[in-house]
Amino acid sequence: MIETGALRIGGFSRVFVWRPWRRVAIASLLLGLAIGACLSLGKVPLAPLELAAALSAPGSDLGLIVWQLRLPRTLLGAMAGGALALSGWLLQQVVRNPLASPDTLGVTGGASAAAVGYLAFLAGTFGSAWLPLAAASGSLTAVGLVYALSWQQGVTPLRLVLMGIGLSAMLAAVTMFMLASSPLSTTLSAYVWLTGSVYGGNWTEVSQLASWFVSALLVMVPLTRFALLAPLDDALAVGIGVRVQLLRGALTLLAAGLAGIAVAWGGAIAFVGLVAPHLARRLVRGPGAAQIVMAGVIGSAMVVLADLLGRTLFLPLDLPAGIFVAAVGAPFFLGLLIRQVR
Amino acid sequence: MTTIAAHELTLGYQRRTILDALSLTLPEGRISVLVGSNGCGKSTLLKALARLLLPWQGNVILDGRDIQRQPTRAVARLLSLLPQQPMAPEGITVRQLVTLGRHPHQSWLAQWSEQDERKVEQALTRTELSEFAERRVETLSGGQRQRAWIAMAVAQDTPLMLLDEPTSFLDLAHQMEVLELLASLNRESGKTIVMVLHDLNLACRYADHIVALRDGRIHAQGTPHEVITRQRVKEIFQLDCQVIDDPYFHTPLCIPFARREGR
């Protein structure tokens, strides 16, 4: 049976469908376990009890490993994955196509071009501290450009996608040109960034990303009601009193912002933005808050686990998480699609 | 009550004019049907009435004021719209779809008031969809799906309903079902209904007021008896026909002949 309940306090009212939240709770639990595994595993593996001891003693040797090396890196990955997944979910709603992702609208393309440009021309003078900001502004600029180019008395989802793909191709060419014409050291650091890595994440980065992420979430909460309406035909949406163009612009901007901050601090791991919302739709049928939270949780878990594999599977090598997001995520995704077709 | 009218409405797509200085007042609390051949502008007129298209000149007057100058949410509390072949979001249930109709009555704070719940239940009962409420819209048959869309408009609880070809793609039995439902909404709740229909005979049976369009202008309007005559049908559709009295409903019944040979 469907367990639907209404929550009404004075003028405040919401409808709740409880069933999908069970799966969300299970997924969150699994995410918690994955984060636990990230804190325990590595060059120095810790048993659960040792982990607890290390966590309670940040000054000890093991505490230092957990608090200064593993925890910030894990949190960075979790937030970047969550933000990308939410961004992908929003864009798939706005564009009404499950194939949309932050890549499609040029987010990753813009961030990559800006990041590589920064590493090639500015990192020498300013150091790498400003890299996230460069990447984030690159992605926002790219999306702004895509939006402006698509504008014709309003924007239609199809035009957005086509313009996004076109601009992404151009930006990829620019990125490749800069990579090919730069000295090898630049190229190497650029490659790590492009694959997507949370290597060497520290608390400064965590707090920067966290403040942006929380701000984006605060914007997202009141917009959720409208995000759920975005897949409706324009005619239907206008019919029930939605200001379609305003809403489309706001949601696209929010999605670009979320993906922008994610790639700024986590590198170009944008595949998460395609797969996580897709999986969430499978696991939580029907649009709603549960589906959104599910997407975020899956995105976080994907990046966290990919990073865990990257730094433990080929010890002592520390490989970028982006490799494993694609290497493990893609076959899983394809398998899912094949099963669905049958 | 709510009135809707078009005043000197001119609009089109790109450079092509579709409607040419068209003025029209639709009777309150009645069923009006727009008829005409393909491309005559009847769907365009309906869209303009629903504020989906911006007029080049003239305006649509809802309750005495220009519809384009009223907040779209306020308009949505007066006027609901069922477009041609609407698409439902993936995975949505009938109840969720019908609930969407409550959007213009909701705010961020109040997203499921007792009023919302009651109106959704009423709409489901009214359209005989209660037993399908938890089904996904994509699993419904064509007729049920159309009822679900109408239920959404019913939940929106507006005095005025606009429908663009609500019976296309339905078999005869389901066409009748949808039209009966709309007629009962008009009869029992006093809703003003404006719709585009292709079937002249069904239009005659259900309409209080028929508006026949030709080349973006109103060719004739009035009761079915006034509008659907042999001469008029020939002018509107370039089609020869014989109009007889429907032996059961006593509305005009149009028997079409071939366009060329005729009689």
Image (cartoon, rainbow, N blue to C red):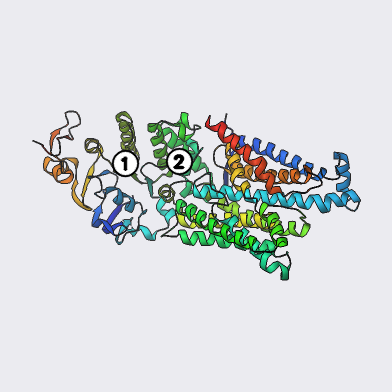
The C terminus of chain B, quarter of image: top left
Asked whether A1 or A178 is in front, the reply is: A178
Total number of numbered discs in the rendering: 2
Q: Which residue is drawn at 22% across and 47% down?
A: B211
User: How far from the left and from the top, in percent, is residue A333?
Assistant: 60, 38
Q: Is residue B123 above or below residue A222?
A: above
Q: Name the residue under label 2.
A: B88
B132 sits left or right of A202 in the view: left
Q: Return the chain for callout 1.
A: B
A46 sits left or right of B192 in the view: right
User: How far from the left and from the top, in percent, is residue A21?
Assistant: 64, 38
Asked whether A160 or A300 is in front, the reply is: A160
Which secondary structure, mark 1? loop
What's the CA distance linking mark 2 and mark 1?
Answer: 17 Å
Q: Return the chain for callout 2.
A: B
Three-letter code for the amino acid on which mark 1 is drawn:
Glu
User: How far from the left and from the top, in percent, is residue B145?
Assistant: 41, 35
- Crowding around mark 1 (Cα neighbors within 10 Å: few <14, some 14 to 19, many 20+) is some
Three-letter code for the amino acid on which mark 2 is drawn:
Ala
Q: Which residue is drawn at 60% across and 55% down?
A: A108
Residue B165, disc = 1
Q: Which residue is drawn at 38% across and 47% down?
A: B80
Residue A321, disc = none
Asked whether B253 or A115 is in front, the reply is: A115
Discs 2 and 1 share one subunit: yes
